[in-house]
Amino acid sequence: MQALVWEGPRQMNMREVEQPKPAADEVLIQVAYSGICGSELGGYLGHNSLRKPPLIMGHEFSGEIVDMGDQAAAIKPALALGARVTVNPLIHDPWSRAALQGRQQLNRTRKIIGIHRPGSYAHYVTAPAVNTYPLPDRLSLEHAALTEPLACAVRAAKLSGAGATSSALITGLGPIGLLTLQVLKQSGVRLIIATDTDPDRRAIGEHFGVTVLDPLVTNVVDAVRERTNGEGVDAAVDAVGVGVTRRDCVQAVTWGGTVVMVGLHEEESTLQANYMIRSEVTVRGSFAYSTLDFEDALTWLADGRLEIDPWLVHAPLAEGGANFERLLGKPGPVAKILLHS
Ligand SMILES: [Zn+2]
């Protein structure tokens, strides 16, 4: 089969590789759509220690089951040949302490499709039956490929604790920031302020009726306090992950507020520790999603609660490398690029 293979920093090429065969507890999926994730941009540049070349990336995908291992149907009776599906790419040990606590993504032996095993930037991909979800009829294959990034946003929004009486800041309107914005907005969050340095992304945020600041011209902390009677917001979600956005979030929340860090751009950052102590700010990480978050995201999508079509871009898999480059430059009004065979 043909696959898009990452072979080293900024090198991604179509290659003929052997078509994978499903193990007894797996299914073989003919890939329909496969999204490009921000974490893969870092991987593509060679900045991500988890990803080692040569690698077929791709973990946000949808497709059709074309082959099944002997036990797959017994593991999940809803699966059948021809079924349209999406996959939770996070493979975990269901009997690990983390999984038993409902935090499957914190299982130390976790394996992610597209990182630890071949992913969906190919015509075919295998996945454990237990991780594979049939799609409700009303959900398109195109939207189903957004389940994984939406699940990340659902988790970040849940951990922020923001609800109908809250105010929130989101730094960064890349795919995760934009999806988090929609989850918070639909959760009834009273006041949302977002930031992005890119004018096209700010315009997408403004479409949702929220204030979007350009951090290059506006002091984010001052602007947030101004709009909240000097208090700061109840919660902040950092969907960038550099020192300045992490520090802005810490200072933009009210005393006793919560900062959720999702963006992984910079390995280490300096934070205002004494300020965090004196103001009792909670800073917490949010990584991927639990099994429940993934299922919640799928339900959310099937219910048609996400508005993303105007900023969804399709591109052929064979032009994957060029589209990685596009996202690293000035991509324009793009919320997500979906690769298709
Ligand atoms: Zn992702």
Image (spheres, grey):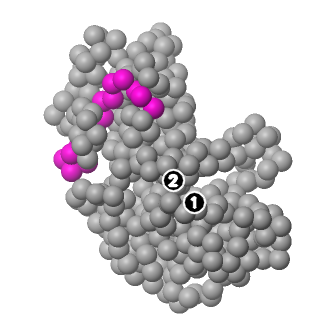
Per the rendered image, the range of residues in magenta is 187-203
The residue under the point 64% across, 61% down is: 133
Which image quarter is the N terminus in? bottom right
Tell me: is circle 1 under 8 Å from ligand 1: no
Residue identifier under label 2: 302
Residue type (three-letter) at the residue carrying disc 2? Ala
Q: Is residue 199 magenta?
A: yes
Res 53 → quadrant: bottom right
Label 2 and label 1: CA atoms lie apart by: 7 Å
Which image quarter is the C terminus in? bottom left
Q: Whole-percent x and y of residue 120?
A: 54, 71
Residue type (three-letter) at the residue carrying disc 1? Pro
- Closer to the N terminus: mark 2 or mark 1? 1
Residue nearer the viewer, 220 or 1: 1
Residue nearer the viewer, 331 or 47: 331
The residue under the point 70% across, 73% down is: 80
Residue nearer the viewer, 116 or 338: 338
- List the single residue furthest toward the front: 137
Q: Is residue 19 left or right of residue 271?
A: right
Residue identifier under label 1: 136
Q: Residues within 10 Å of mark 2 (few under 14, many from 20)?
A: some
Q: Is residue 286 left or right of residue 270?
A: right
The residue under the point 39% across, 74% down is: 320
Q: Are marks 2 and 1 in contact (CB under 8 Å)?
A: yes
The residue under the point 25% across, 60% down is: 331
Up-down: is 89 above or below 151? Answer: below
Q: Whole-percent x and y of residue 182?
A: 39, 41
Up-down: is 149 above or below 283? Answer: below
Res 24 → quadrant: bottom right
- List the single residue furthest toward the left: 217
